[in-house]
Image: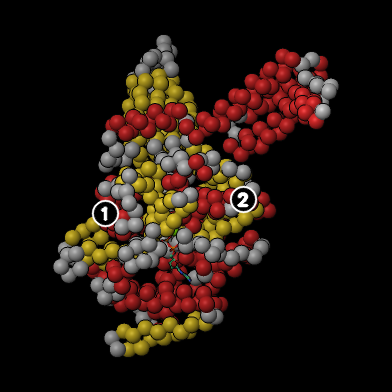
Amino acid sequence: MALVGIDLGTTNSLIAIWKDHKVELLPNSLGHNMTPSVVGVDDDGTLLVGEIAKERRISHPDYTAAEFKRHMGTDYKYTLGDKTYLPEELSAILLKKLIADAQTKVAEPITEAVISVPAYFDNNQREATKRAAQIAGIEVKRLVNEPSSAVLYKQWKKREDRVDGIHLVVDFGGGTLDISVVDCFENIIEIMAVSGNNQLGGKDFDLCIAKDFCTKTGLSFNNLRKSTRENILWTAENVKKALTENDSVTMRVNIDDQKYETVYSTKELLQVTSQVLVQMKEVLNDALRGAKIELEDVEEIILVGGSCKMPVVQKYLSALFQRPLTIDPEGDYLVGYGAGVLTGIINRESEISDIVMTDVCPFSLGIASKNDKSDKYPSLSVIIPKNSMLPTSKSQVFSGLVPFQEHLSIHVYQGEEYWCMDNLDLGAFLLDITPNEKGDTRALVTFSYDIDGLLVVTAKDLIGDHSLEAVVTQKATLLTPEEIEQKRLALKEQNILQKFEEENRRILAWAQRLYTQADGANKFALANIIETYSKALPEDSLIAVQKMRKDTIARLLQLEMTINTDFFGDDDIISKLMDDTTED
Ligand code: ADP
Ligand code: MG
Protein backbone atom coordinates (compact mmCIF):
# COMPACT_ATOMS: atom_id res chain seq x y z
CA MET A 1 0.00 0.00 0.00
CA ALA A 2 1.40 3.33 -1.02
CA LEU A 3 1.12 6.75 0.57
CA VAL A 4 1.42 9.80 -1.71
CA GLY A 5 1.67 13.54 -1.15
CA ILE A 6 -0.72 15.77 -3.08
CA ASP A 7 -0.68 19.53 -3.67
CA LEU A 8 -4.33 20.08 -4.49
CA GLY A 9 -4.05 23.58 -5.92
CA THR A 10 -6.66 26.06 -7.06
CA THR A 11 -5.03 26.23 -10.46
CA ASN A 12 -2.63 23.31 -10.68
CA SER A 13 -2.20 20.09 -8.75
CA LEU A 14 0.80 17.83 -8.19
CA ILE A 15 1.43 14.40 -6.78
CA ALA A 16 4.68 13.22 -5.16
CA ILE A 17 6.04 10.14 -3.49
CA TRP A 18 8.97 9.27 -1.22
CA LYS A 19 11.13 6.70 -2.98
CA ASP A 20 14.72 5.55 -2.66
CA HIS A 21 15.58 8.07 0.05
CA LYS A 22 14.23 11.05 -1.83
CA VAL A 23 11.07 12.76 -2.98
CA GLU A 24 9.89 12.38 -6.55
CA LEU A 25 7.09 13.98 -8.56
CA LEU A 26 4.79 11.61 -10.44
CA PRO A 27 3.93 13.08 -13.86
CA ASN A 28 0.43 12.79 -15.32
CA SER A 29 -0.56 10.73 -18.37
CA LEU A 30 0.70 13.53 -20.63
CA GLY A 31 4.07 13.48 -18.91
CA HIS A 32 3.56 16.81 -17.10
CA ASN A 33 4.27 17.35 -13.43
CA MET A 34 1.44 19.87 -13.06
CA THR A 35 -2.15 18.98 -13.80
CA PRO A 36 -4.54 21.93 -14.24
CA SER A 37 -7.26 21.75 -11.57
CA VAL A 38 -10.03 21.84 -14.14
CA VAL A 39 -12.90 19.38 -14.64
CA GLY A 40 -15.26 19.19 -17.57
CA VAL A 41 -17.73 16.89 -19.28
CA ASP A 42 -17.70 15.79 -22.88
CA ASP A 43 -20.79 15.79 -25.13
CA ASP A 44 -21.31 12.12 -24.32
CA GLY A 45 -21.03 12.74 -20.58
CA THR A 46 -17.42 11.55 -20.17
CA LEU A 47 -15.52 13.38 -17.45
CA LEU A 48 -12.47 15.34 -18.60
CA VAL A 49 -9.73 16.38 -16.20
CA GLY A 50 -6.65 18.58 -16.48
CA GLU A 51 -5.18 19.98 -19.71
CA ILE A 52 -8.07 18.77 -21.89
CA ALA A 53 -10.69 20.32 -19.66
CA LYS A 54 -8.70 23.56 -19.44
CA GLU A 55 -8.52 23.81 -23.23
CA ARG A 56 -12.32 23.61 -23.46
CA ARG A 57 -12.93 26.43 -21.00
CA ILE A 58 -13.62 29.05 -23.64
CA SER A 59 -15.34 26.79 -26.16
CA HIS A 60 -17.50 24.98 -23.58
CA PRO A 61 -17.83 27.29 -20.56
CA ASP A 62 -21.05 25.58 -19.48
CA TYR A 63 -19.34 22.20 -19.45
CA THR A 64 -16.18 23.21 -17.61
CA ALA A 65 -15.44 24.00 -13.96
CA ALA A 66 -12.22 25.60 -12.71
CA GLU A 67 -11.01 27.16 -9.46
CA PHE A 68 -13.57 25.14 -7.52
CA LYS A 69 -11.19 25.15 -4.56
CA ARG A 70 -12.35 28.72 -3.99
CA HIS A 71 -15.78 27.36 -3.00
CA MET A 72 -14.55 24.36 -1.02
CA GLY A 73 -16.62 23.69 2.08
CA THR A 74 -19.69 25.49 0.77
CA ASP A 75 -22.75 24.12 -0.98
CA TYR A 76 -22.01 26.14 -4.11
CA LYS A 77 -23.23 24.07 -7.08
CA TYR A 78 -21.38 23.82 -10.35
CA THR A 79 -23.50 22.86 -13.34
CA LEU A 80 -21.74 20.84 -16.00
CA GLY A 81 -24.18 19.98 -18.73
CA ASP A 82 -27.24 18.49 -17.06
CA LYS A 83 -25.58 17.55 -13.78
CA THR A 84 -24.58 19.59 -10.73
CA TYR A 85 -21.49 19.06 -8.62
CA LEU A 86 -20.31 20.27 -5.23
CA PRO A 87 -16.75 21.67 -5.04
CA GLU A 88 -15.71 18.57 -3.08
CA GLU A 89 -17.09 16.28 -5.78
CA LEU A 90 -15.07 18.11 -8.43
CA SER A 91 -12.00 17.87 -6.20
CA ALA A 92 -12.67 14.15 -5.83
CA ILE A 93 -12.74 13.74 -9.62
CA LEU A 94 -9.44 15.60 -9.88
CA LEU A 95 -7.90 13.49 -7.09
CA LYS A 96 -9.02 10.29 -8.77
CA LYS A 97 -7.36 11.31 -12.00
CA LEU A 98 -4.11 12.34 -10.27
CA ILE A 99 -4.00 8.99 -8.51
CA ALA A 100 -4.92 6.93 -11.55
CA ASP A 101 -2.09 8.60 -13.53
CA ALA A 102 0.38 8.18 -10.68
CA GLN A 103 -0.64 4.56 -10.17
CA THR A 104 0.91 3.60 -13.50
CA LYS A 105 4.32 4.48 -11.99
CA VAL A 106 3.83 3.00 -8.53
CA ALA A 107 3.83 -0.75 -7.97
CA GLU A 108 1.70 -0.85 -4.86
CA PRO A 109 -1.90 0.39 -4.82
CA ILE A 110 -2.15 4.03 -3.75
CA THR A 111 -4.57 4.05 -0.84
CA GLU A 112 -3.48 6.94 1.35
CA ALA A 113 -2.47 10.55 0.89
CA VAL A 114 -1.08 13.59 2.60
CA ILE A 115 -2.94 16.54 1.10
CA SER A 116 -1.81 20.13 1.40
CA VAL A 117 -4.36 22.87 2.07
CA PRO A 118 -4.01 26.63 2.45
CA ALA A 119 -2.99 27.37 6.03
CA TYR A 120 -5.98 29.63 6.26
CA PHE A 121 -8.54 26.95 5.37
CA ASP A 122 -11.19 26.79 8.08
CA ASN A 123 -12.80 23.68 9.51
CA ASN A 124 -15.45 23.44 6.81
CA GLN A 125 -12.88 23.67 4.04
CA ARG A 126 -10.63 21.06 5.66
CA GLU A 127 -13.52 18.68 6.23
CA ALA A 128 -14.62 19.14 2.62
CA THR A 129 -11.08 18.28 1.48
CA LYS A 130 -11.19 15.10 3.54
CA ARG A 131 -14.57 14.20 2.11
CA ALA A 132 -13.21 14.75 -1.41
CA ALA A 133 -10.48 12.20 -0.69
CA GLN A 134 -13.00 9.80 0.74
CA ILE A 135 -15.16 10.11 -2.35
CA ALA A 136 -12.03 9.45 -4.42
CA GLY A 137 -11.45 6.31 -2.40
CA ILE A 138 -8.32 7.28 -0.51
CA GLU A 139 -7.66 7.94 3.12
CA VAL A 140 -6.20 11.26 4.23
CA LYS A 141 -3.26 10.52 6.49
CA ARG A 142 -2.63 14.18 7.16
CA LEU A 143 -3.69 17.58 5.97
CA VAL A 144 -0.63 19.80 5.87
CA ASN A 145 -0.58 23.56 5.48
CA GLU A 146 0.85 24.50 2.10
CA PRO A 147 3.55 26.93 3.31
CA SER A 148 4.66 24.47 6.01
CA SER A 149 4.99 21.88 3.31
CA ALA A 150 7.19 24.22 1.23
CA VAL A 151 9.52 24.93 4.17
CA LEU A 152 9.71 21.26 5.07
CA TYR A 153 11.00 20.49 1.60
CA LYS A 154 13.48 23.38 1.60
CA GLN A 155 14.89 22.38 4.98
CA TRP A 156 15.11 18.74 3.97
CA LYS A 157 16.85 19.65 0.73
CA LYS A 158 19.38 21.85 2.50
CA ARG A 159 19.81 19.33 5.29
CA GLU A 160 23.61 19.61 5.15
CA ASP A 161 23.56 23.39 5.54
CA ARG A 162 20.13 24.29 6.80
CA VAL A 163 19.41 27.93 7.47
CA ASP A 164 18.45 28.43 11.09
CA GLY A 165 16.23 31.37 11.90
CA ILE A 166 12.90 32.80 10.93
CA HIS A 167 11.60 32.12 7.43
CA LEU A 168 8.67 33.86 5.82
CA VAL A 169 6.86 31.90 3.13
CA VAL A 170 4.72 33.79 0.67
CA ASP A 171 2.64 31.38 -1.38
CA PHE A 172 0.70 33.38 -3.95
CA GLY A 173 -1.21 31.02 -6.21
CA GLY A 174 -4.13 31.33 -8.58
CA GLY A 175 -6.86 31.78 -6.02
CA THR A 176 -5.29 32.05 -2.60
CA LEU A 177 -2.57 33.92 -0.78
CA ASP A 178 -1.02 32.07 2.10
CA ILE A 179 1.65 33.44 4.42
CA SER A 180 3.50 31.57 7.11
CA VAL A 181 6.13 32.64 9.57
CA VAL A 182 8.32 29.66 10.33
CA ASP A 183 11.16 29.31 12.80
CA CYS A 184 13.80 26.72 11.91
CA PHE A 185 16.41 25.43 14.26
CA GLU A 186 18.40 22.31 13.50
CA ASN A 187 15.89 19.52 12.84
CA ILE A 188 12.88 21.44 14.15
CA ILE A 189 10.51 23.36 11.94
CA GLU A 190 8.11 25.38 13.99
CA ILE A 191 5.26 27.34 12.48
CA MET A 192 4.95 30.59 14.45
CA ALA A 193 2.00 32.18 12.71
CA VAL A 194 -0.09 31.84 9.63
CA SER A 195 -2.28 34.24 7.77
CA GLY A 196 -3.93 34.33 4.43
CA ASN A 197 -6.70 35.33 2.13
CA ASN A 198 -8.71 32.55 0.53
CA GLN A 199 -10.08 34.94 -2.03
CA LEU A 200 -6.95 36.59 -3.37
CA GLY A 201 -4.78 35.23 -6.14
CA GLY A 202 -3.62 35.38 -9.72
CA LYS A 203 -7.25 35.40 -10.88
CA ASP A 204 -7.68 38.80 -9.30
CA PHE A 205 -4.87 40.24 -11.41
CA ASP A 206 -6.59 38.76 -14.49
CA LEU A 207 -9.91 40.25 -13.45
CA CYS A 208 -8.37 43.71 -12.87
CA ILE A 209 -6.78 43.61 -16.33
CA ALA A 210 -9.95 42.29 -18.00
CA LYS A 211 -12.13 44.98 -16.46
CA ASP A 212 -9.63 47.71 -17.30
CA PHE A 213 -9.46 46.39 -20.86
CA CYS A 214 -13.25 46.63 -21.16
CA THR A 215 -13.29 50.17 -19.78
CA LYS A 216 -10.56 51.24 -22.21
CA THR A 217 -12.21 49.61 -25.23
CA GLY A 218 -15.76 50.66 -24.39
CA LEU A 219 -17.09 47.23 -23.48
CA SER A 220 -19.28 46.49 -20.48
CA PHE A 221 -17.65 43.56 -18.67
CA ASN A 222 -20.74 42.62 -16.67
CA ASN A 223 -23.00 42.49 -19.70
CA LEU A 224 -20.80 40.25 -21.81
CA ARG A 225 -21.73 36.70 -22.80
CA LYS A 226 -20.14 34.08 -20.56
CA SER A 227 -17.87 32.75 -23.30
CA THR A 228 -16.73 36.27 -24.23
CA ARG A 229 -15.94 37.02 -20.62
CA GLU A 230 -13.95 33.78 -20.36
CA ASN A 231 -12.15 34.76 -23.55
CA ILE A 232 -11.17 38.18 -22.19
CA LEU A 233 -10.08 36.68 -18.86
CA TRP A 234 -8.02 34.08 -20.69
CA THR A 235 -6.31 36.76 -22.76
CA ALA A 236 -5.80 38.92 -19.66
CA GLU A 237 -4.02 36.01 -17.97
CA ASN A 238 -1.74 35.60 -20.98
CA VAL A 239 -0.99 39.33 -21.04
CA LYS A 240 -0.15 39.16 -17.33
CA LYS A 241 2.18 36.22 -17.94
CA ALA A 242 3.79 37.90 -20.98
CA LEU A 243 4.51 40.92 -18.80
CA THR A 244 6.77 38.65 -16.75
CA GLU A 245 9.13 38.51 -19.72
CA ASN A 246 8.38 41.81 -21.49
CA ASP A 247 8.00 45.44 -20.48
CA SER A 248 4.96 46.02 -22.65
CA VAL A 249 2.39 43.78 -24.28
CA THR A 250 -0.56 44.39 -26.60
CA MET A 251 -3.83 42.86 -25.49
CA ARG A 252 -6.05 41.87 -28.43
CA VAL A 253 -9.48 40.28 -28.32
CA ASN A 254 -11.83 39.45 -31.20
CA ILE A 255 -15.50 39.67 -30.36
CA ASP A 256 -18.08 38.98 -33.06
CA ASP A 257 -15.54 39.76 -35.78
CA GLN A 258 -14.63 43.04 -34.21
CA LYS A 259 -11.10 43.73 -32.95
CA TYR A 260 -10.47 45.34 -29.58
CA GLU A 261 -6.98 46.16 -28.41
CA THR A 262 -4.88 48.16 -26.00
CA VAL A 263 -1.26 48.13 -24.80
CA TYR A 264 -0.14 47.32 -21.27
CA SER A 265 3.19 48.27 -19.77
CA THR A 266 4.61 47.03 -16.47
CA LYS A 267 3.82 50.43 -15.01
CA GLU A 268 0.19 50.19 -16.10
CA LEU A 269 -0.02 46.69 -14.71
CA LEU A 270 1.10 48.06 -11.37
CA GLN A 271 -1.53 50.79 -11.54
CA VAL A 272 -4.39 48.55 -12.63
CA THR A 273 -3.67 45.86 -10.05
CA SER A 274 -2.56 48.02 -7.12
CA GLN A 275 -5.58 47.02 -5.04
CA VAL A 276 -4.48 43.37 -5.15
CA LEU A 277 -1.00 44.32 -3.93
CA VAL A 278 -2.41 46.38 -1.09
CA GLN A 279 -4.56 43.45 0.00
CA MET A 280 -1.43 41.32 -0.05
CA LYS A 281 0.29 43.74 2.32
CA GLU A 282 -2.56 43.44 4.81
CA VAL A 283 -2.06 39.70 5.00
CA LEU A 284 1.70 40.13 5.49
CA ASN A 285 1.08 42.53 8.34
CA ASP A 286 -1.30 40.12 9.99
CA ALA A 287 1.23 37.28 9.80
CA LEU A 288 4.09 39.35 11.27
CA ARG A 289 1.83 40.63 14.02
CA GLY A 290 0.71 37.08 14.76
CA ALA A 291 4.32 35.93 15.08
CA LYS A 292 5.18 38.95 17.26
CA ILE A 293 8.33 39.70 15.30
CA GLU A 294 9.91 42.66 13.52
CA LEU A 295 10.84 42.89 9.85
CA GLU A 296 14.57 42.58 10.68
CA ASP A 297 13.96 39.27 12.42
CA VAL A 298 13.14 37.58 9.14
CA GLU A 299 16.18 35.59 7.99
CA GLU A 300 14.88 34.24 4.69
CA ILE A 301 11.90 34.98 2.47
CA ILE A 302 10.66 32.16 0.28
CA LEU A 303 8.44 33.05 -2.66
CA VAL A 304 6.20 30.24 -3.87
CA GLY A 305 3.30 29.99 -6.30
CA GLY A 306 2.67 31.22 -9.82
CA SER A 307 1.71 34.78 -8.90
CA CYS A 308 5.10 35.34 -7.24
CA LYS A 309 6.57 34.99 -10.72
CA MET A 310 5.17 38.43 -11.53
CA PRO A 311 7.90 41.09 -11.49
CA VAL A 312 5.42 43.57 -10.01
CA VAL A 313 4.80 41.24 -7.08
CA GLN A 314 8.53 40.66 -6.54
CA LYS A 315 9.26 44.39 -6.79
CA TYR A 316 6.48 45.25 -4.38
CA LEU A 317 7.66 42.65 -1.86
CA SER A 318 11.29 43.77 -2.26
CA ALA A 319 10.24 47.32 -1.48
CA LEU A 320 8.26 46.19 1.57
CA PHE A 321 11.08 44.05 2.94
CA GLN A 322 13.85 46.35 1.72
CA ARG A 323 15.92 43.57 0.24
CA PRO A 324 16.24 41.94 -3.18
CA LEU A 325 13.86 39.02 -3.67
CA THR A 326 13.39 36.41 -6.37
CA ILE A 327 11.10 33.45 -6.72
CA ASP A 328 12.49 30.08 -5.77
CA PRO A 329 13.54 28.22 -8.94
CA GLU A 330 11.46 25.26 -7.77
CA GLY A 331 8.62 27.56 -6.70
CA ASP A 332 5.94 25.61 -8.57
CA TYR A 333 6.90 22.33 -6.95
CA LEU A 334 7.84 23.20 -3.36
CA VAL A 335 4.43 22.45 -1.85
CA GLY A 336 4.04 19.16 -3.71
CA TYR A 337 7.59 18.08 -2.87
CA GLY A 338 6.98 18.95 0.78
CA ALA A 339 3.86 16.78 0.89
CA GLY A 340 6.04 13.97 -0.48
CA VAL A 341 8.69 14.51 2.20
CA LEU A 342 5.98 14.38 4.83
CA THR A 343 4.86 10.96 3.58
CA GLY A 344 8.44 9.80 4.22
CA ILE A 345 8.30 11.16 7.76
CA ILE A 346 4.92 9.54 8.37
CA ASN A 347 6.23 6.22 7.09
CA ARG A 348 9.16 6.66 9.47
CA GLU A 349 11.80 6.44 6.78
CA SER A 350 14.92 6.41 8.92
CA GLU A 351 16.83 9.06 6.99
CA ILE A 352 14.28 11.75 7.77
CA SER A 353 12.58 10.48 10.89
CA ASP A 354 14.39 13.03 13.06
CA ILE A 355 12.68 16.01 11.40
CA VAL A 356 10.03 17.48 13.64
CA MET A 357 7.48 19.89 12.28
CA THR A 358 4.96 21.64 14.44
CA ASP A 359 2.03 23.63 13.21
CA VAL A 360 -0.33 26.22 14.60
CA CYS A 361 -4.06 26.66 14.79
CA PRO A 362 -4.89 29.16 12.04
CA PHE A 363 -7.99 30.53 13.80
CA SER A 364 -9.37 31.02 17.30
CA LEU A 365 -11.74 28.50 18.87
CA GLY A 366 -14.13 29.29 21.68
CA ILE A 367 -17.63 29.12 23.00
CA ALA A 368 -20.56 31.48 23.10
CA SER A 369 -20.89 33.41 26.33
CA LYS A 370 -22.86 36.31 27.75
CA ASN A 371 -21.46 38.56 30.47
CA ASP A 372 -24.86 39.51 31.62
CA LYS A 373 -28.32 38.09 31.13
CA SER A 374 -29.39 41.38 29.61
CA ASP A 375 -26.92 40.80 26.75
CA LYS A 376 -28.93 40.31 23.61
CA TYR A 377 -26.37 38.32 21.63
CA PRO A 378 -23.58 36.07 22.85
CA SER A 379 -19.98 37.02 22.18
CA LEU A 380 -17.15 34.61 21.53
CA SER A 381 -15.12 33.61 24.55
CA VAL A 382 -11.86 32.33 23.08
CA ILE A 383 -10.40 29.16 24.59
CA ILE A 384 -7.71 28.33 22.01
CA PRO A 385 -6.30 31.55 20.52
CA LYS A 386 -5.25 31.78 16.90
CA ASN A 387 -1.63 30.72 16.24
CA SER A 388 -1.47 28.36 19.24
CA MET A 389 1.00 25.56 18.68
CA LEU A 390 -0.56 22.18 17.85
CA PRO A 391 -1.47 19.85 19.38
CA THR A 392 -2.83 21.96 22.18
CA SER A 393 -5.19 21.66 25.08
CA LYS A 394 -6.63 24.68 26.91
CA SER A 395 -9.22 25.08 29.64
CA GLN A 396 -11.39 27.82 31.03
CA VAL A 397 -13.96 28.03 33.82
CA PHE A 398 -17.48 29.22 32.99
CA SER A 399 -20.32 30.07 35.36
CA GLY A 400 -24.07 29.93 34.82
CA LEU A 401 -25.80 33.23 34.05
CA VAL A 402 -28.83 32.80 36.28
CA PRO A 403 -29.12 31.27 39.79
CA PHE A 404 -29.90 27.57 39.97
CA GLN A 405 -29.20 26.98 36.30
CA GLU A 406 -29.47 23.29 35.41
CA HIS A 407 -27.68 23.14 32.06
CA LEU A 408 -24.76 24.88 30.50
CA SER A 409 -24.89 25.20 26.75
CA ILE A 410 -21.46 24.79 25.17
CA HIS A 411 -21.83 26.31 21.75
CA VAL A 412 -18.56 26.02 19.82
CA TYR A 413 -17.44 28.63 17.27
CA GLN A 414 -14.37 29.27 15.18
CA GLY A 415 -13.15 32.66 14.03
CA GLU A 416 -11.84 36.06 15.01
CA GLU A 417 -15.07 38.08 15.19
CA TYR A 418 -16.47 39.46 18.42
CA TRP A 419 -20.05 38.31 18.02
CA CYS A 420 -20.64 34.56 17.78
CA MET A 421 -23.01 34.91 14.86
CA ASP A 422 -20.19 36.38 12.74
CA ASN A 423 -18.04 33.28 13.28
CA LEU A 424 -18.28 29.73 12.00
CA ASP A 425 -20.72 27.61 14.02
CA LEU A 426 -19.21 24.21 14.88
CA GLY A 427 -22.09 22.83 16.94
CA ALA A 428 -23.50 22.89 20.46
CA PHE A 429 -23.52 20.53 23.46
CA LEU A 430 -25.46 20.58 26.71
CA LEU A 431 -23.82 19.89 30.08
CA ASP A 432 -25.96 19.15 33.11
CA ILE A 433 -24.74 21.18 36.06
CA THR A 434 -25.40 21.18 39.80
CA PRO A 435 -25.90 24.48 41.62
CA ASN A 436 -24.49 24.97 45.15
CA GLU A 437 -26.68 26.23 48.06
CA LYS A 438 -26.43 29.82 46.77
CA GLY A 439 -27.45 28.77 43.27
CA ASP A 440 -24.02 29.31 41.69
CA THR A 441 -22.84 26.96 38.98
CA ARG A 442 -19.37 26.44 37.56
CA ALA A 443 -17.90 24.23 34.87
CA LEU A 444 -14.45 23.67 33.41
CA VAL A 445 -14.46 23.58 29.63
CA THR A 446 -11.42 22.08 27.87
CA PHE A 447 -10.61 22.20 24.15
CA SER A 448 -8.06 19.81 22.70
CA TYR A 449 -7.09 20.44 19.10
CA ASP A 450 -4.79 18.13 17.15
CA ILE A 451 -2.52 18.56 14.15
CA ASP A 452 -5.20 17.32 11.73
CA GLY A 453 -7.71 19.83 12.98
CA LEU A 454 -9.74 17.48 15.14
CA LEU A 455 -11.35 19.28 18.06
CA VAL A 456 -12.35 17.42 21.23
CA VAL A 457 -14.45 19.31 23.76
CA THR A 458 -14.69 18.13 27.35
CA ALA A 459 -16.64 19.82 30.10
CA LYS A 460 -16.77 19.10 33.81
CA ASP A 461 -19.25 20.30 36.34
CA LEU A 462 -17.11 21.74 39.18
CA ILE A 463 -19.80 21.47 41.84
CA GLY A 464 -21.64 18.27 40.97
CA ASP A 465 -20.13 15.39 39.07
CA HIS A 466 -21.55 15.78 35.56
CA SER A 467 -19.22 15.70 32.62
CA LEU A 468 -19.29 15.40 28.88
CA GLU A 469 -16.89 14.71 26.07
CA ALA A 470 -17.58 15.37 22.42
CA VAL A 471 -15.68 15.28 19.17
CA VAL A 472 -16.51 18.31 17.07
CA THR A 473 -16.76 17.47 13.40
CA GLN A 474 -18.88 18.70 10.58
CA LYS A 475 -22.40 17.33 10.34
CA ALA A 476 -21.55 15.28 7.29
CA THR A 477 -18.40 13.75 8.70
CA LEU A 478 -17.51 10.36 7.32
CA LEU A 479 -15.10 9.27 10.05
CA THR A 480 -16.20 6.09 11.77
CA PRO A 481 -16.63 6.24 15.54
CA GLU A 482 -13.65 3.87 15.90
CA GLU A 483 -11.40 6.18 13.91
CA ILE A 484 -12.48 9.14 15.94
CA GLU A 485 -11.78 7.19 19.11
CA GLN A 486 -8.30 6.28 17.83
CA LYS A 487 -7.55 9.88 17.00
CA ARG A 488 -8.89 11.01 20.30
CA LEU A 489 -6.56 8.62 22.15
CA ALA A 490 -3.60 9.71 20.04
CA LEU A 491 -4.40 13.31 20.83
CA LYS A 492 -4.35 12.57 24.54
CA GLU A 493 -0.83 11.20 24.23
CA GLN A 494 0.37 14.30 22.38
CA ASN A 495 2.70 12.18 20.31
CA ILE A 496 4.96 14.77 18.78
CA LEU A 497 6.02 16.24 22.05
CA GLN A 498 6.79 12.90 23.60
CA LYS A 499 10.33 12.64 22.32
CA PHE A 500 11.04 16.07 23.76
CA GLU A 501 9.37 15.32 27.02
CA GLU A 502 11.68 12.36 27.58
CA GLU A 503 14.79 14.43 27.03
CA ASN A 504 13.50 17.15 29.31
CA ARG A 505 12.92 14.68 32.09
CA ARG A 506 16.42 13.29 31.66
CA ILE A 507 17.93 16.77 32.00
CA LEU A 508 15.89 17.54 35.08
CA ALA A 509 16.88 14.25 36.69
CA TRP A 510 20.50 14.96 35.91
CA ALA A 511 20.28 18.42 37.49
CA GLN A 512 18.60 16.94 40.54
CA ARG A 513 21.32 14.37 40.94
CA LEU A 514 23.97 17.08 40.77
CA TYR A 515 22.00 19.10 43.31
CA THR A 516 22.26 16.19 45.74
CA GLN A 517 25.98 15.91 45.14
CA ALA A 518 26.76 19.64 45.22
CA ASP A 519 27.26 22.04 48.05
CA GLY A 520 27.50 25.79 48.62
CA ALA A 521 27.15 28.08 45.66
CA ASN A 522 26.78 25.17 43.26
CA LYS A 523 23.71 23.89 45.07
CA PHE A 524 22.20 27.33 44.78
CA ALA A 525 23.01 27.54 41.07
CA LEU A 526 21.46 24.13 40.46
CA ALA A 527 18.30 25.01 42.33
CA ASN A 528 18.03 27.98 40.02
CA ILE A 529 18.53 25.89 36.90
CA ILE A 530 15.93 23.33 37.98
CA GLU A 531 13.38 26.00 38.76
CA THR A 532 13.84 27.98 35.55
CA TYR A 533 13.99 24.89 33.37
CA SER A 534 10.91 23.19 34.75
CA LYS A 535 8.92 26.41 34.72
CA ALA A 536 9.74 27.21 31.12
CA LEU A 537 8.89 23.79 29.74
CA PRO A 538 5.16 23.33 29.33
CA GLU A 539 4.13 26.54 27.57
CA ASP A 540 7.22 27.37 25.53
CA SER A 541 7.76 26.70 21.88
CA LEU A 542 9.85 23.71 20.91
CA ILE A 543 12.62 25.90 19.59
CA ALA A 544 12.77 27.96 22.78
CA VAL A 545 12.95 24.69 24.70
CA GLN A 546 15.67 23.34 22.41
CA LYS A 547 17.79 26.47 22.84
CA MET A 548 17.28 26.54 26.56
CA ARG A 549 18.10 22.87 26.65
CA LYS A 550 21.42 23.43 24.92
CA ASP A 551 22.35 26.17 27.40
CA THR A 552 21.26 24.02 30.30
CA ILE A 553 23.24 21.02 29.12
CA ALA A 554 26.36 23.19 28.74
CA ARG A 555 25.95 24.54 32.25
CA LEU A 556 25.27 21.12 33.71
CA LEU A 557 28.38 19.70 32.03
CA GLN A 558 30.38 22.52 33.55
CA LEU A 559 28.89 21.92 36.98
CA GLU A 560 29.40 18.20 36.62
CA MET A 561 33.10 18.84 36.08
CA THR A 562 33.35 21.11 39.11
CA ILE A 563 31.32 18.91 41.38
CA ASN A 564 32.75 15.56 40.37
CA THR A 565 36.24 16.80 39.61
CA ASP A 566 38.65 14.26 38.23
CA PHE A 567 42.02 15.74 39.19
CA PHE A 568 43.85 13.49 36.83
CA GLY A 569 41.95 14.47 33.69
CA ASP A 570 39.72 12.15 31.74
CA ASP A 571 42.35 10.72 29.40
CA ASP A 572 42.15 7.01 29.00
CA ILE A 573 45.24 6.22 31.05
CA ILE A 574 44.76 2.49 30.96
CA SER A 575 44.75 2.16 27.20
CA LYS A 576 47.77 4.45 27.03
CA LEU A 577 49.50 2.21 29.48
CA MET A 578 48.50 -0.80 27.47
CA ASP A 579 49.92 0.74 24.30
CA ASP A 580 53.13 1.49 26.14
CA THR A 581 53.26 -2.07 27.39
CA THR A 582 52.94 -3.70 23.96
CA GLU A 583 55.85 -1.65 22.69
CA ASP A 584 58.07 -3.15 25.30
P1 ADP B 1 -2.37 27.26 -7.22
O1 ADP B 1 -1.41 27.00 -6.10
O2 ADP B 1 -3.45 28.18 -6.86
O3 ADP B 1 -2.85 26.04 -7.89
P2 ADP B 1 -0.15 28.23 -8.88
O4 ADP B 1 0.84 28.42 -7.80
O5 ADP B 1 0.13 27.20 -9.90
O6 ADP B 1 -1.60 28.08 -8.34
O7 ADP B 1 -0.34 29.65 -9.59
C1 ADP B 1 -1.25 29.86 -10.59
C2 ADP B 1 -1.34 31.33 -10.89
O8 ADP B 1 -0.06 31.81 -11.26
C3 ADP B 1 -2.28 31.65 -12.01
O9 ADP B 1 -3.09 32.73 -11.66
C4 ADP B 1 -1.35 32.03 -13.17
O10 ADP B 1 -1.92 32.99 -14.01
C5 ADP B 1 -0.17 32.61 -12.43
N1 ADP B 1 1.06 32.47 -13.20
C6 ADP B 1 1.64 31.33 -13.63
N2 ADP B 1 2.75 31.60 -14.35
C7 ADP B 1 2.88 32.95 -14.35
C8 ADP B 1 3.83 33.86 -14.92
N3 ADP B 1 4.87 33.45 -15.64
N4 ADP B 1 3.64 35.18 -14.72
C9 ADP B 1 2.59 35.61 -13.99
N5 ADP B 1 1.67 34.82 -13.45
C10 ADP B 1 1.80 33.50 -13.62
MG1 MG C 1 -0.37 26.27 -4.64
Measuring 35% from the left and 23% from the top, which residue is drawn there?
468
Give the label, 2 or 1, closer to the camera.
Answer: 2
Instruction: Find disc 2 in the rendering and name its residue.
Output: 160
Q: Inspect the image, locate mark 1, and give the three-letter code of the amino acid beneath it.
A: Glu
Above/below status of 359 relative to 432: below
Q: Tell me if residue 320 can be seen.
A: yes
Mark 2 → mark 1, Cα distance in angstroms? 42 Å
Q: Nearer the viewer, residue 401 or 116?
A: 116
- Identify the image quadrant of the N terminus: top left
- Callout 2 secondary element: helix
Residue 471 falls in image quadrant: top left
* Number of residue marks: 2
Instruction: Find disc 1 in the rendering and name its residue.
Output: 89
Q: Is residue 553 left or right of residue 435?
A: right
- Neighbor class of circle 1 (other Cα within 10 Å; few <14, some 14-19, many 20+) is many
Above/below status of 215 relative to 360: below
- Identify the image quadrant of the C terminus: top right
Q: Position of residue 158 (x, y in %)?
A: 59, 53
Measuring 51% from the left and 68% from the top, which residue is drawn there?
309
Furthest residue toward right: 567
Q: Is residue 319 left or right of residue 565?
A: left
Furthest residue toward bottom: 258
Q: Position of residue 119 (x, y in %)?
A: 46, 49
- Rendering quadrant holding ligand 2: bottom left
Q: Inspect the image, locate mark 2, and give the three-letter code of the amino acid beneath it.
A: Glu
Residue 512 falls in image quadrant: top right
Q: Tell me if residue 414 can be seen.
A: no
